Image: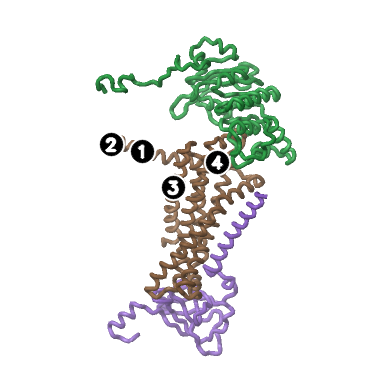
């Protein structure tokens, strides 16, 4: 029994210390003004790897999610004779929730795991050490551009996801199921507010981008530099990012849309 | 050069993101250049504003001509005072038109429909609708129907 | 303290995850010479290099390199200080996303503001020094193990350091690659006046090029001196290591319970 309690306590200490370490790590990454001359090309390279290469999965998932929303929504709404509300339903779900959340989950799986594996492998092959020995801070050289790239890419990806999803919903709703196009857009426009819905959704995705990128680079940097260590760090990235995104989504939604 | 290509692709990616945000702003949330244009304000008093909400739409013959700005209680008459802004290019709403609260579909959003009058004069900025028709309250309608009373 | 010592360690104690790796190590590494640090695997030879490079801090004791007290250096001073040292990692640690040329050019690009044509000249000179000028367009994945290490060597001398540390340069190399590396280390040391620290467990190669050697085992230095002095060293442990005898003061068997018990031969006593 005492052993159990001790194990629980140890777990708690581990959690707290890893939070502390990741916080110090983050401070180390963000400390110091990045020099634009050297920093910008690195950032562009990472934006390509993290953002552009995530685009296909984002576009395809957005399209299908929008189409499914239209189909599901149509069958439910047509029971009440309000098929026209399908536009508003799709737009609100995507802009407020699914856009930021699904993008973040896909991002964690596609880009986050890649970031972790890349940094972990650089650690295992002593590339990070050798940077240090060359007098180059790997936190700024390797980690910071990746963190920023994740942070910047996420809202961009989320916006693209939402637009593609709405377009997919329109394809199914208007072109296939025959909802009147004017009421599709009209209903949508009258119920979606730019500040309350679109901007709040963007804020969500900015937060998710930051958290996902942070978890990914930290797990890579902190991993045990062996193949087993890298694989477990990659798994942790995906699991922790997904949980963090879903948890934060609830909190953010409560703050933004809940009536307190 | 490979580096140049990367830069161009990343540039396009960022542009695509901005374009997507623009689409969300203009096409999806209807934050059109029109609404940023000049509008004029008119008022309507309702006995029951029902489920009207701010930023709901105001339409004429099914065409959106404005939005609801605010709904407040007039403490003297205990009526709901609805402030709406109408696009200034729709400047010929007859003065005897009435504002009717309607529902899109059975469960859709409620909006204000302006049913056109025949007066030669038109509503100006700050005017109030002369006649209004309050929200159709489904519950009341059913209870009226059940008790056999005529519409009050 | 020896006035010609470039690096001097005093009573360094270092432990990691509860295991004591160094237990009061004192060592002077002379300037401008090749010093070999030898010892069985797992005795923390690489850790020693990391202590010198300031990547790890000792629990107690001092590490002084060229007058700098390394563990006490501030982050910024430490990074500036490291520009004076080169390190050749066991795996080479080339940046896998950069070509050979860019790998060697990397420290120059980061630490100097040289114009592009000068960087090119310096890089080609360094690659020439390791005999790989023709391989400049290859990617690290296309190189053999020996070539990888030579490129890494070219990279670590790109900034003309005062000190270069070799972490197991001979491990896993074929005889020709090993011969090339031995020659390179010797030539670099004499031509550039470098202080070289060599960590290895390849006894003959190390002793053939070093001016001074020390052997670490069990967290202590068990023998030091010139190669000749070491060969005559009275300690049984030193002789066992140098001659590679399987059994001796360092037992063949990892400490264990009696074999009879483990194999269950003593009648089921548990």
Q: Position of residue B110 (x, y in %)?
A: 43, 75
Quadrant (top left, top right, bottom left, bottom right) of the N terminus of chain C: top right
The Cα atoms of the two marked residues, 4 and 2, are separated by 41 Å
- Chain of residue at mark 2: A
**Both marks 2 and 3 on one chain:** yes
- State whether discs 3 and 1 lie on one chain: yes
- Residues tagged 3 and 4 counted as in contact (Cβ below 8 A): no
Question: Which residue appears at 62% of the width and 58% of the height?
Answer: B12
Please tell me whether mark 3 or mark 1 is closer to you in this view.
3
Question: Which one of the lettered chains is coloured purple?
Answer: B
Q: Which residue is mark 4?
A: A28
Please state the total of marks drawn on the protein image: 4
Q: Are the residues under marks 4 and 2 on the same chain?
A: yes
Q: Which chain is green?
A: C
Q: Which residue is mark 3?
A: A240
Q: Chain of mark 3?
A: A
Tell me which label, 3 or 4, sits earlier in the chain.
4
Q: Is residue C99 left or right of residue A260?
A: right
């Amino acid at each position: 029994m005492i052993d159990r309690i001790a194990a629980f306590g140890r777990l708690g200490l581990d959690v707290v210390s890893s939070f502390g370490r990741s916080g110090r790590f983050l401070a180390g990454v963000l400390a110091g003004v990045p020099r634009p001359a050297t920093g910008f090309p690195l950032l562009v390279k990472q934006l390509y790897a993290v953002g552009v290469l995530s685009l296909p999965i984002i576009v395809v998932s957005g399209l299908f999610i929008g189409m499914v929303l239209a189909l599901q929504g149509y069958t439910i709404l047509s029971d009440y004779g309000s098929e026209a509300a399908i536009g508003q339903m799709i737009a609100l779900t995507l802009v407020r929730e699914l856009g930021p959340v699904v993008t973040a989950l896909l991002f964690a799986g596609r880009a986050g795991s890649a970031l972790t594996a890349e940094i972990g492998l650089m650690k295992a092959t002593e590339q990070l050490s050798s940077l240090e020995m060359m007098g180059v801070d790997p936190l700024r050289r390797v980690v910071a551009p990746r963190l920023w790239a994740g942070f910047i890419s996420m809202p961009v990806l989320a916006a693209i996801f939402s637009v593609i999803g709405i377009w997919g919903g329109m394809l199914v709703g208007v072109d296939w199921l025959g909802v009147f196009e004017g009421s599709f857009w009209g209903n949508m426009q009258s119920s979606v507010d730019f500040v309350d819905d679109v901007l709040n959704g963007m804020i969500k995705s900015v937060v998710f981008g930051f958290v996902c990128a942070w978890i990914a680079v930290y797990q890579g940097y902190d991993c045990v530099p062996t193949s087993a260590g890298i694989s477990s760090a990659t798994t942790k990235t995906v699991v922790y990012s997904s949980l963090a995104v879903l948890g934060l989504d609830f909190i953010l939604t409560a703050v933004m849309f809940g009536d307190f | 050069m490979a580096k140049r290509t990367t830069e161009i692709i990343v540039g396009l990616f960022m542009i695509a993101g901005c374009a997507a945000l623009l689409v969300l702003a203009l096409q999806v949330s209807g934050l059109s250049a029109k609404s940023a244009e000049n509008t004029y304000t008119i008022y309507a008093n309702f006995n029951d504003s029902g489920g009207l909400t701010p930023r709901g739409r105001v339409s004429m013959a099914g065409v959106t001509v404005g939005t609801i700005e605010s709904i407040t209680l007039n403490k003297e008459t205990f009526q709901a005072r609805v402030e709406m802004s109408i696009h200034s290019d729709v400047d010929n709403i007859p003065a005897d038109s009435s504002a009717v609260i309607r529902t899109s579909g059975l469960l859709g959003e409620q909006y204000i429909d302006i049913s056109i009058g025949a007066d030669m004069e038109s509503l100006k900025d700050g005017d109030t609708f002369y006649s209004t028709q309050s929200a159709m309250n489904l519950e009341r309608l059913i209870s009226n129907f059940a008790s056999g009373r005529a519409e009050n | 303290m020896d006035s010609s010592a470039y690096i001097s360690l005093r009573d360094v104690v270092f432990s990691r995850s509860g295991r004591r790796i160094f237990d009061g190590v004192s060592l002077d590494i002379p300037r401008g010479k090749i010093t070999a640090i030898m010892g069985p695997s797992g005795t923390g030879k690489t850790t020693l290099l990391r202590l010198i490079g300031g990547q790890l801090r000792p629990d107690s004791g001092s590490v002084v390199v060229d007058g700098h007290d390394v563990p006490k250096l501030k982050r910024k001073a430490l990074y500036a200080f490291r520009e004076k040292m080169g390190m050749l990692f066991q795996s080479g640690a080339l940046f896998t996303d950069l070509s050979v040329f860019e790998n060697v050019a990397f420290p120059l690009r980061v630490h100097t503001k040289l114009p592009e044509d000068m960087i090119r000249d310096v890089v080609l000179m360094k690659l020439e020094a390791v005999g790989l000028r023709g391989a400049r367009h290859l990617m690290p994945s296309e190189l053999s193990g020996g070539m990888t290490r030579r490129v890494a060597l070219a990279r670590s001398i790109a900034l003309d350091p005062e000190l270069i540390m070799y972490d197991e340069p001979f491990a896993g190399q074929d005889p020709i690659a090993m011969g090339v590396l031995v020659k390179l280390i010797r030539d670099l040391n004499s031509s550039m006046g470098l202080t070289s620290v060599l960590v290895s467990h390849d006894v003959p190669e190390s002793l053939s090029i070093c001016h001074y050697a020390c052997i670490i085992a069990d967290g202590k230095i068990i023998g030091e001196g010139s190669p000749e002095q070491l060969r005559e060293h009275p300690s049984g442990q030193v002789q066992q290591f140098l001659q590679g005898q399987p059994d001796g003061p360092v037992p063949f068997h990892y400490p264990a319970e009696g074999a009879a018990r483990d194999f269950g031969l003593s009648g089921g006593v548990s």
